[in-house]
Image (cartoon, coloured by chain):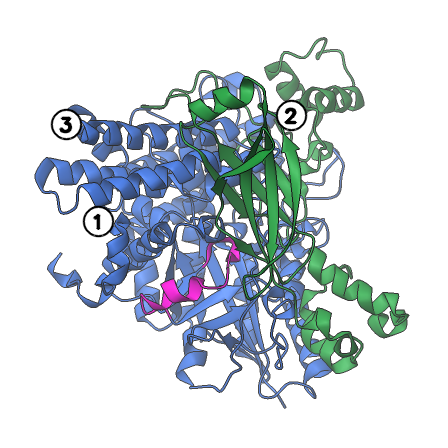
Chain colours: A blue, B green
Amino acid sequence: MKTSKLNFIFNAHLPFVRHPEYEKFLEEDWLYEAMNESYIPLLRMMYRLRDDSVPFRLTFSLSPTLCAMLSDELLNERFVAYIDQHIELGDKEIERLKDNPEKRVLAESFRNELVINKAFYQNECQGNILNAFNELSNSGCLELITTTATHAYLPVFKDYPIAINAQIETGVLEHSRHFDKMSDGFWLPECGYFNGLEELLKRHNISWVSLASQALVLSRDEAECGSYSPVRCPNGLYCFTRDSNLASLVWSSTEGYPADPCYRDFYRDIGFDLPWDYIRPYVHEPEVRSFTGFKYYAVTGDTADKAVYDRQKAAERVVSHAKNFIYHVQSRTRSISDYVDGDPIYTVSFDAELFGHWWYEGVQWIESLVRQIAESDDVSLMTPSDFIKSKPIVQTLNPAPSSWGVGGYSAVWVDNTSNAWLYRHIFKAIERMTELAERFPAQKSLKQRFLNQAARETLLLMASDWPFIIHNQTSAEYARKRVEGHIANLNLVYDNMCKNAVNTEWLVKAEKRDNLFKHLDYNIMNRNHLNEPSPIFTTDFSAE
Amino acid sequence: MVLINIGSLSENELRNIASQEDLEDWETLSRDELIDALEDLYDEDENSLNEEHSGSSRKKFVNTLTDVQSANDLSLPGTEPLPESYNETSIHMILKDMNWAYVFWSLSSQLETEFEDGGAELVLRNVRFDVDCNEVASYDIEISPSDDNWTVELPHLGYSYQVCLVLRKEGEEKVLCKSSPVSTTESWLSTHPEKLRDNVTFKKMFSSLVLKGGTVLENNQVRELIAKITDDGADAEVAR
């Protein structure tokens, strides 16, 4: 009997959004919502599994921008304020719903979740969520990996290997600083891959990546193993391709598990349902309604007449959906076992924020799945590094250029109806930053800080989030202004350096505002840097 | 602008959005009328954000039901309008997929003047190379002074492409700038159709690409491979 090996990879990422110049900022809520609804519930769930001695191995990619925000004092203070404010809203809701026992019970449970999350954050996490991820990694439950510095989608920067290297190198170094260990794997944002990228990854001792499902089917080489075994690039990098079939069971907005009528509806939220005067303190000025997390209805269907959410019913459905997932894995293994050598490996990757935030019951679903797998004889969990340590014999081939985006490559991030115009400016900024690094190498003191800040602005500019948001037209104006701001900042340094000047007032403000990647060295953008060994072999992280 | 999942919203939610958008007579409209009016206002397919994505949670950056961030009032430090172009002559090509590339270019102000004054023609030339870097074919696209980008077709897989800007004047041609080449790949399976019809290969390669509901991953190349099987009358095999 073959064992189906499940390789779950969760990509936790948010763009760097930090606005000390505002008391409250709408887009900063992305972080607080993800912390409260996804990251902390996921961590609590994994602590429960560990404390119950349930064996599990999962992989989490934590992006450097997310790590920077999770470690930021201001944002952590604001998160506590966010939680406290929502607990207060919970108290108001319990009072408002005193004559509606069905909804009142829900309000109490949402409020209790906030209280428990806050306690977990302050006690187990010690005010920094990364501590809890690190502890689970040290316990042997998680493989933690990194990604590009600002989640840049790499295929569009193919003509700028120095910029791609800067993204990878910064990602690898930031990971080492946060977790005191190297990242063996590397999350390619949006699973974006092009032939040749593996050389820049191996330069930093990366052992494996995860690719989009079609990367083997569309390879110019014959994939003898099919999609059920990892492969190696000619330079030895291991590639684990995503299984779209299994992923679609979980994430399809119309047919996936989260669309089940009895699960909690994401969109029906009191932030939009209740009178303005009542909800005002918990949303945004000027008069911007937003999600509060207090949601009392089940998906039900495409109707306004929705059923009140029933926790018990949803919990039962979670168990059956976890069972159904395992059933699908087992039946596929049966159908292919005669054609595949060894145990089939299924790589299933998701954005971490799907679980808890978008799919309220998603965290419970993972827990149920892990518990059921622990009792199974023929399904097990593994991480890519577990597989590599077993010294497997795998095929070497050239994967096809690919991504998990619509259409299979770059169309989402290079869309001439919405975001393609960005690249004229982003490419120019990269060229200017490279010019600065090469004209002014090895600067010290203020000029060094000035140039380091320019490098930070360049990396932030390259984030895949801005074209993605503009493509999706959600907060598009914010994304556009972020692009304009990072370019203006870079240009300010460029113009000043060309005049042999440093704008110190601007520098101090910019360092406080975009305060991530404290150890970034602008020389990373000098093309000669690619002729030097990766700093991961020479940096003493303990000395920092 | 977007409006998310409009059919699922309560009348209250719809009224709140309508009020926020200053919709005329919003107090007196029925739920269906509110939905129609808001759809008109946003001029969007209500499902634009529910677009099925082959990846994962694609609605990541949403914290309101509409894109209501008061953008015009949003002030971020240091933002400045971007220039329309940079005073240089250059061209770039980015692959959108294996069949299409996005091309954009800039002209120096001197060339721009020369071009706009008339007497000169500018063409975008797409050149195809084989694996040994030999030029195989090319085609020209005439462009106007107001153009600064184009989406070009890459008609044959397995070749490299390079675009260049060519100035034609008084019967002579001058190449102004060239992009870096981009390569397209042709899959091994597309050149071995007999393997596609093999049940073992099909199960090994394609079973992970069939989504819940029976559709195949949204990817032209993958779908073309599937079409090759069905074109050859092997529908039953695929169904099996």
Q: Chain of mark 1?
A: A
Q: CA distance from mark 3 to mark 2?
A: 54 Å
Asked whether the viewer can see residue A50, the reply is: yes
Secondary structure, mark 1, is helix
Around disc 3, counting alpha carbons within 10 Å, would you say few (fewer than 14), some (14 to 19), or many (20 or more)? some
The tag on residue A501 is 3
Judging depth in this view, the residue of A540 and A125 nearest the camera is A540
Q: Is residue A285 left or right of residue A405?
A: left
Q: Quadrant of residue B231?
A: bottom right
For mark 2, what is the residue?
A: B13
Numbered disc total:
3
Mark 1 belongs to which amino acid?
Answer: Asn
**Where residue B152 sits in the image (x, y, percent)?**
64, 43
The tag on residue A523 is 1
Around disc 1, counting alpha carbons within 10 Å, would you say few (fewer than 14), some (14 to 19), or many (20 or more)? many
Nearer the observer, disc 3 or disc 2? 3
Q: Is residue B219 magenta?
A: no
Q: CA distance from mark 2 to mark 1?
A: 52 Å
**Where residue B12 sits in the image (x, y, percent)?**
67, 23
Q: Residue at x 89, y 72 (%)?
A: B236
